């Protein structure tokens, strides 16, 4: 079935554009007819109705709100169906010679032709020169009036006619089945393209309407250092008037808005590719939407800085309940990649009009994938490995195995030569130029998260890590967090989404909004150099060893929880204490705590390659954990958990997955302990900077939260960190339960 765009544009409540044209034109409105299907503005929304009786300039209309209701409406609150697609009331139009007459609503003026919507909803284009003098003047004045109303944000824009929504074929393969480790060659990624260069700058500007909400900030670059800002307005909050999504072309070099682009009201602008000069948008169908229009992506032609946007192709997509569908990328002129469900990425070939591959990462916490800046590689964190896919084909370029639990985030540096990953305890860095598959491992407790983290390179020694609401700068050469950052309070919620803030080429691009102002449309884009003022000067002479809370000569005890062999575990841990040159003391304040257990039931789906048949299996993972505690503070922790393999080849999928679910006592013998652990009160660096309307400013040159009472603040910081971890874990657990159901 082909579904065409039915964009309905209504006037503002009690606002008639004919006010600008004089009263004589109002009387030329087409009369309503008894029995005619119309739309009426009732109870705050435009509703379907039927004319029962016409009473001069009023009409008795029957409509449904809870139950069938009849009410008398002014003509200003009644629309013929052709008027819902036009920009004015229906009226009588005629040619200069009088040979052609039609009752219709003006929709637009294009190429010196008046585009009219007739009462039967058919559309005709009539040359302006052939119309009567009165009609020609009316059309031109109406377009001028409408243009002024659109530019001032008082009425929605008319957007392009859209192509039909295509149903793409399914001919995809699973990326997990294509990799041959024996043939793997480690190569650097592509560097950031030279056109993506930006200077430190900032610009404040107004959205067209206060109800517009920021959706995306897309780096385009080029000589004018362009940034494309996308905004969307939900019709629920604008009296069901379908105001367009808006794009703002911003030149950071010239510090001004170059132009605005209107697209359809239901589309979210997600990505722009400067090479292909195409824009990608998503229309996600809401649960209560009865229009029959499915969720779909649209690809548009849009030249940098220009306002003319041309829709090229639309195709339907099934978006999962717990996925917003906003990770969607233009890989090249032919391939689009998007996350359609939790744990599922799909790529389409627009030329062949079919799915070409599907990736189902085995990541329990569904860690977001990263597309490199050259748009050629997709970096995917999985529970036991880091996988790099060719974004255009779905083929696996490489897999980096992990001895520890899976990563919560990953990213590549600007030159494409280093790959970094992070979890709750460590940072891993692969040197891609060396060809070595083994990473260098850095201890980094309290920097990342066991669930999901953002990690971005500032330079080859500094990485910016974010988990929860905290941004921390980590220095690899010191193996230490050195600085903390925070957003101005009013801007925090805008910058948690990678579509709205990101690091590129050592600069942070972020969004700021002035707080306490009535003008809600005012926004600012900031681009600042990292790490910011005073950071390198203050942190260059840090003596890491002086910050340790645990190191050679410190007394450490062992506490055993529920494990399958207490004696062996205790023996292993005591040997590790001695190997680290710590002193074993069972009554020490610092204790190592070992524990094992079985988690909640999880479900997972497998799909037969080539056949499409699906299998659902369930399992209860076995976990082993080791923590180092000082009182109630967790100084360090590690653990492992069983799971499900990426793919199976067994006749009995349930039995194949179940055989992986076994207690892992050997974890306590194999686990590596850091020889030194820094005091948690230094876990977020030695100062704080703030991003806001004035760029980046140093707020404190003392460790975060420890300006007044160092000991009390350190305890509070540890409690806050532990609370954030617990809240995040509970949230992930709830999401997992929902997904399983």
Image (cartoon, helix red, strand yellow):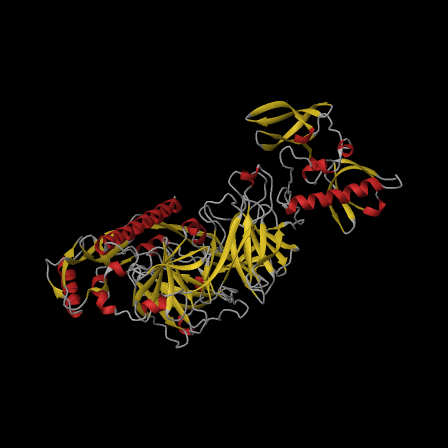
Is residue 364 in sight in this rendering?
Answer: no
- In this rendering, would 93 be left or right of 66? right
Res 696 visible: yes
The x, y position of residue 193, in whole percent, is 52, 69
Residue at position x 29%, y 51% in the image: 720
359 horizontally vs 635: left or right: right
The percent position of residue 741, horizontal first and vertical second, equals 39, 43
In the image, residue 76 sits, relative to residue 601, either above or below, namely above
Q: In the image, what residue occupies the spot 61% across and 53% down?
A: 260
Q: Relative to 280, is 711 on the left or the right?
A: left
Which is nearer the eye, 92 or 542?
Answer: 542
State the quadrant of the N terminus. Answer: top right
Q: Nearer the viewer, residue 651 or 112?
A: 112
Q: Position of residue 475 (x, y in %)?
A: 34, 67
In the image, residue 393 sits, relative to residue 500, either above or below, namely: below
Q: At which x and y percent is residue 249?
A: 59, 57
Q: Nearer the viewer, residue 712 or 102?
A: 712
Seen in the picture, residue 32 relative to 205 is either above or below; the reply is: above
- Residue that lies at the very extreme toward the right in this rendered image: 97
- Looking at the rendering, which quadrant does residue 352 occupy? bottom right
């Amino acid at each position: 079935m082909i579904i065409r765009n039915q964009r309905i544009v209504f006037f503002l409540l009690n606002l008639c554009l004919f006010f600008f044209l004089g009263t004589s034109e109002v009387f030329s409105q087409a009369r309503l007819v008894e029995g005619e299907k119309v739309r009426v503005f009732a109870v705050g929304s435009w509703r379907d109705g039927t004319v029962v009786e016409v009473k001069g300039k009023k009409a008795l209309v029957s409509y449904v709100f809870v139950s069938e209701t009849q009410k008398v409406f002014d003509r200003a609150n009644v629309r013929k169906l052709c008027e819902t697609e036009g920009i004015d009331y229906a009226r009588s139009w005629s040619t200069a010679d009088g040979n052609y007459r039609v009752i219709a609503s003006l929709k637009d003026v294009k190429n010196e032709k008046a585009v009219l919507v007739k009462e039967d909803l058919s559309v005709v284009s009539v040359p302006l020169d052939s119309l009567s003098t009165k009609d020609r003047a009316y059309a031109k004045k109406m377009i001028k009036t409408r243009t002024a109303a659109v530019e001032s944000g008082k009425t929605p824009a008319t957007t392009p006619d859209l192509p039909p929504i295509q149903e793409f074929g399914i001919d995809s393969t699973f990326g997990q089945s294509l990799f041959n480790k024996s043939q793997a060659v480690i190569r650097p990624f592509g560097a950031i393209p030279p056109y993506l260069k930006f200077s430190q700058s900032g610009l404040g500007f107004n959205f067209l309407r206060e109800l517009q909400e920021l959706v995306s900030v897309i780096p385009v670059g080029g000589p004018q250092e362009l940034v494309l800002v996308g905004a969307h307005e939900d019709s629920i909050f604008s009296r069901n008037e379908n105001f367009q999504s808006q794009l703002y072309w911003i030149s950071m070099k010239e510090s001004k808005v170059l132009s605005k682009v209107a697209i359809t009201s239901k589309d979210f602008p997600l990505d722009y590719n400067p090479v292909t000069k195409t824009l990608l948008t998503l229309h996600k169908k809401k649960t209560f939407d009865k229009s029959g229009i499915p969720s779909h992506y649209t690809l548009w032609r849009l030249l940098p800085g220009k306002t003319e946007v041309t829709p090229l192709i639309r195709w339907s997509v099934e978006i999962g309940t717990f996925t917003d569908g906003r990770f969607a990328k233009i890989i090249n002129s032919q391939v689009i990649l998007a996350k359609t469900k939790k744990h599922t990425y799909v790529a389409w070939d627009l030329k062949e009009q079919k799915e070409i591959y599907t990736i189902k990462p085995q990541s329990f916490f569904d860690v977001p994938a990263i597309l490199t800046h050259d748009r050629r590689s997709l970096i995917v964190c999985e529970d036991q490995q880091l996988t790099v896919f060719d974004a255009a084909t779905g083929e696996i370029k490489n897999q980096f195995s992990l001895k520890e639990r899976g990563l919560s985030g990953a990213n590549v540096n600007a030159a494409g030569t280093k790959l970094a990953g992070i979890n709750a305890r460590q940072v891993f860095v692969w040197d891609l130029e060396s060809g070595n598959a083994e990473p260098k491992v850095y201890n980094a407790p309290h920097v990342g998260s066991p669930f999901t983290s953002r990690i971005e390179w500032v330079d080859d020694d500094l990485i910016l890590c974010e988990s929860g609401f905290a941004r921390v700068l980590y220095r690899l050469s010191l193996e230490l967090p050195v600085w903390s950052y925070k957003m101005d309070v009013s801007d925090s919620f805008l910058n948690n989404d990678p579509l709205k803030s990101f690091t590129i080429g050592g600069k942070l691009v972020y969004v700021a909004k002035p707080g306490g102002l009535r003008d809600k449309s005012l926004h600012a884009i900031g681009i600042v150099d990292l790490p910011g003022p005073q950071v390198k000067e203050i942190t260059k002479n840090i003596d890491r060893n002086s910050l340790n809370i645990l190191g050679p000569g410190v007394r450490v005890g062992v506490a055993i929880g529920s494990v399958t062999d207490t004696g062996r575990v205790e023996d292993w841990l005591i040997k590790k204490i001695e190997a680290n040159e710590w002193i074993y003391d069972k009554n020490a304040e610092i204790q190592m705590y070992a524990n094992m257990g079985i988690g909640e039931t999880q479900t997972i789906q497998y799909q037969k390659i080539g056949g499409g048949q699906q299998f659902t299996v369930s399992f209860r993972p076995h976990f082993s954990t080791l923590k180092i505690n000082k009182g109630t503070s967790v100084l360090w922790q590690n653990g492992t958990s069983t799971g499900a393999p990426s793919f199976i080849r067994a006749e009995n999928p349930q039995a194949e997955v179940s055989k992986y679910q076994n207690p892992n006592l050997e974890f306590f013998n194999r686990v590596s302990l850091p020889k030194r652990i820094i005091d948690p009160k230094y876990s977020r660096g030695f100062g704080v900077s703030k991003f806001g309307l004035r760029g980046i400013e140093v707020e404190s040159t003392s460790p975060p939260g420890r300006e007044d009472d160092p000991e009390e603040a350190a305890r509070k910081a540890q409690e806050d960190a532990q609370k954030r971890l617990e809240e995040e874990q509970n949230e992930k657990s709830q999401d997992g339960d929902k997904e399983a159901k």
